[in-house]
Image (cartoon, grey):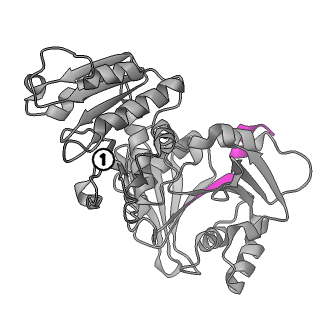
Amino acid sequence: MNSHNAANLLSLLVLAGGESSRMGYNKAYLPWRGKTLLTDLLCRSLVVPFSSIIVSANAPIDLTNLPGQLEVIADKSSEKIKEYFWTPPKGESRTLAVIGDTFPHCGPLSGMEAAMRAYPAPRRLVLSVDLPFYDFSALSRFLTSTGAGSYEAIVPVVNGKENPLAAVYTDSVYKKIRAALQSGDYRVRQIYKDAVRFIDESAYAHQYVNTNTPVAYKDALAYETNRQRTVPVISVTADSSGTGKTRLCVALIRRLTARGYAVGYVKSTHHNVSGEKPGSDTWLAKAAGAVAVYIAARADTDRPDKSRALLLHAEAMPVDVVFIETRSRAVFPAIKILAPGEAPPPADEGEKITAVVSPEPPTATNDYRCFTPANIREISEYIISLLPAE
């Protein structure tokens, strides 16, 4: 059976949950590519001819920004089911059902149980809603690598980590799911450990990046933002002078240059500059390996959209990544250097910031990655993770 025909026998189950305890907000509604995580995932799913699409959700689901026409064809309130007929702008129409859990507050297994009970299917792809980069290409690898022997699940493994919420299951696991829920053992691995085929997906690791915390969501936004730019950009910012912005930029330029990246450097200053001098910030950046530098003085950036001016200079550089050093004109994503004793900004004041660097380990935060100035290797690896893969 070829992969296209096999896909016709597949149902898609999207686990949209609703509790989002680590995120603190319903992940399905998080903005993504002009839609939400849920509606963008549903649009991406159109590349596969699924026999049906089921969304498991225990909170009201807003599908108003789903492109095309959406018509309610059944509202089975007593069964916690609502069915739609979805006609996208392009492609074939699909049936779409939203279903609530029979076993509430029991994690992913409860969503799988409800979907399998109401909509039986030979096999189904089970996906968590918080996979913003999943493009469904894994199915061709899964369905053309059936191997010998029977199985109840095909589970991707990325760098040694199993990903059971991006896996294919047969409905033969239904009885195991019911037994697990009734016993109080809600671990997904329990339902497939005895009859599973693992597929190494390490070469496609980025597809399995999830956004189940605020900081992970920011990182995904940073990656996506840089993917859309001519040149990826990272801002390095601080509220005051003397906190080590240039020192950090120089160390990172040196580190990334050694890794084979062509690095650019844009310096924002409120001074008027007549030329580069030995020991100046741009001179230090060049000495560290920067192949392109630019100093944006007061006359260059004293305009309404100063951050945009810095970004334009950065995107004009023939490099792989640019560091923008600035106090108050950062563009997203930004790394903020904290002064001794300074706390990370509240989340609603740090929308551009994805990471903080503090001379003292900052108070644990779920809103930013946290580093100390000595963690240059870790900071550089973090920056590389925000750069689009070639």
Residue 234 on the magenta span: no
Q: Is residue 195 left or right of residue 169?
A: right
Image quarter (top left, top right, bottom left or bottom right) of the N terminus: top right
**Which of the 4 image quarters holds residue 252?**
top left
Q: Please, what is the three-letter code of the amino acid marked with disc 1?
A: Lys
Which residue appears at 50% of the width and 82% of the height? 78
> Can I make out residue 248 in this image?
yes
Which residue appears at 65% of the width and 55% of the height? 11
Residue situated furthest bottom in the rendering? 183
Which residue appears at 68% of the width and 42% of the height? 202
Nearer-the-camera pick, 231 or 150: 231
Which residues fall within the magenta stretch? 1-14
Vertical order, 190 against 290 (above or below): below
- On the image, the x and y values in percent for residue 121 come to 70, 60
> Can I make out residue 317 in this image?
no
- On the image, the x and y values in percent for residue 18 come to 45, 70
- On the image, the x and y values in percent for residue 173 come to 76, 68
Nearer-the-camera pick, 161 or 262: 262
**Which of the 4 image quarters holds residue 364?**
bottom left
Q: Is residue 53 left or right of residue 29?
A: right
Residue annotated with mark 1: 336
